[in-house]
Image (cartoon, grey):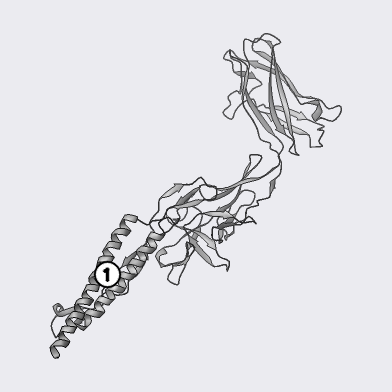
């Protein structure tokens, strides 16, 4: 009878621990990237009663409860928040704390500090590879990711332009149509070039491209290109032929920028004419050019694959860095250190750090977060089971105490 107390007491201790685990799981029901823990019970050794075989053994209760974190995939939800990220599949984001300790997390709720450092919400620095001229090399060592928040991107002069233009075949001789397009010089200043088309006969047009006189120094030539266009019976351009872009030469800009040399592409990459002559109203569509003005960073976002991309006020985008992903063979061996972070222990396998979707690593999804793996229904079921187990163990102690009192009374 003496073992009944200790046996029941071991059950009380085990159930208390199990209820603590359930409580922690439920408390983190809404914690981003949280991995719920499960409880593993094991019995203690049994004592042998008499000299009989195994059928004379009596157990001594339940052993110390083991808690195991379940690293199953949590559901991923698109948040629309630029710096949120989630991992679909295996792996962890790599971070470093203020003491330069390497930690791991599934919580991709990131933010920028005052210095442009990409951090977790609790201040750990996110690790990855910085880009050089927009190109990332994920084979080198990782480092803190720093975003040049106040940086600017230099302007780029227009070198190529195109526009889709239909010239009405019903236009009278000497009838005109004008199509403006904005281009940029080497200083990032915008200039409007105007292409004026004049019909000279059936299927024949002249063109002249001009720039405003105010954009030029005194005596500058406002006409930067001119020539003729010939259309076939199907309304397609036949002359100039494909592969011969029209060069627009702009010299003597008033703002002191370099002279401009722009290729006006009359055909697309497939060799189809961008200029047509059909029996419908003259119109311009889809003007394009490859220049841009100076721009400042307007937004930083994490895109699919873990690329950190800066968007500038001039519409340009530049890859700043790429997030690292660590694959660990036995993640359950890591220790929880708070703030949704894990740290490797002596039993943890070496982390394999690489880019998203490589070497067994999961894929990073931008503007998304992973939900907790806590299952409320399962946790409440476990809670009820542990509660009943605790009540049963309490009853064993009460019964054993009653029997002990009866035994003492027999002696007296």
Q: Is residue 350 above or below residue 197?
A: below
Horizontal side of residue 119 vs 47, given as left or right: right
**Where's residue 107, x and y in %?**
48, 56
Q: Is residue 108 above or below residue 223?
A: below
Q: Is residue 412 above or below residue 247?
A: below
Horizontal side of residue 102 vs 26, given as left or right: right
Horizontal side of residue 360 vs 60, given as left or right: right
Q: Nearer the viewer, residue 138 or 150?
A: 150
**Where's residue 373, x and y in %?**
38, 56
Horizontal side of residue 405 vs 356, given as left or right: left
* Total residue callouts: 1
Circle 1 sits in a helix, a strand or a loop, which is it? helix
Who's the residue at 76% across and 33% down the image? 260
Q: Nearer the viewer, residue 224 or 82?
A: 82
Q: Nearer the viewer, residue 282 or 5?
A: 5
Name the residue that disc number 1 marks: 390
Who's the residue at 58% across and 14% down the image? 280
Residue 111 position by quadrant: bottom right
* Residue lying at the far right of the rendered structure: 218
**Where's residue 242, x and y in %?**
63, 25
Who's the residue at 23% across and 77% down the image? 397
Tell me the crowding category of disc 1: few under 14, some 14 to 19, or many 20 or more residues within 10 angstroms, Cα based. many
Quarter of the picture holding the N terminus: bottom left
Residue 168 position by quadrant: top right
């Amino acid at each position: 009878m003496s073992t009944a107390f200790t046996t029941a007491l071991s059950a009380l201790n085990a159930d208390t621990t199990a209820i603590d685990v359930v409580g922690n799981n439920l408390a983190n029901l809404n914690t981003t990237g949280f991995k719920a823990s499960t409880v593993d019970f094991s019995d203690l050794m049994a004592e042998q009663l008499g000299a009989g075989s195994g059928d004379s053994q009596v157990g001594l209760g339940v052993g110390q409860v083991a808690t195991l974190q379940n690293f199953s995939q949590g559901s991923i939800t698109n948040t629309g928040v630029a710096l949120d990220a989630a991992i679909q599949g295996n792996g962890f984001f790599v971070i470093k704390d203020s003491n330069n300790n390497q930690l791991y997390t599934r919580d991709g709720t990131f933010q920028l500090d005052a210095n442009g450092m990409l951090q977790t919400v609790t201040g750990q620095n996110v690790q990855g590879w910085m880009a050089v001229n927009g190109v990332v090399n994920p084979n080198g060592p990782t480092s803190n990711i720093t975003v040049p928040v106040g940086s600017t991107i230099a302007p780029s002069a227009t070198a190529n332009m195109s526009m889709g233009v239909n010239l009405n075949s019903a236009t009278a001789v000497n009838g005109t149509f004008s199509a403006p397009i904005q281009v940029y010089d080497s200083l990032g200043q915008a200039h409007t070039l105007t292409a004026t088309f004049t019909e000279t006969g059936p299927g024949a047009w002249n063109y002249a491209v001009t720039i405003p006189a105010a954009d030029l120094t005194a005596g500058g030539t406002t006409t930067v290109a001119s020539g003729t266009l010939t259309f076939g019976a199907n309304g397609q351009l036949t002359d100039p032929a494909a592969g011969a872009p029209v060069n627009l030469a702009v010299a003597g800009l008033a703002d002191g920028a370099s002279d401009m040399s722009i290729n006006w592409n009359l055909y697309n990459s497939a060799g189809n004419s961008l200029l047509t002559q059909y029996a419908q109203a003259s119109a311009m569509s889809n003007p394009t050019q490859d220049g841009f003005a100076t721009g400042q960073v307007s937004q930083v976002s994490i895109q699919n694959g873990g690329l950190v991309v800066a968007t500038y006020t001039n519409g340009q985008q530049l890859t700043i860095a790429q997030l690292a992903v660590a694959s660990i063979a036995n993640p359950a061996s890591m220790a929880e250190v708070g703030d949704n972070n894990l740290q490797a222990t002596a039993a943890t396998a070496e982390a394999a750090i690489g880019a998203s979707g490589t070497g067994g690593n999961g894929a990073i999804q931008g503007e998304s977060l992973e939900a907790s793996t806590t299952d409320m229904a399962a946790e409440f079921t476990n809670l009820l089971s542990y509660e009943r187990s605790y009540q049963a163990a309490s009853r064993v102690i009460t019964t054993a105490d009653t029997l002990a009192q009866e035994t003492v009374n027999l002696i007296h």
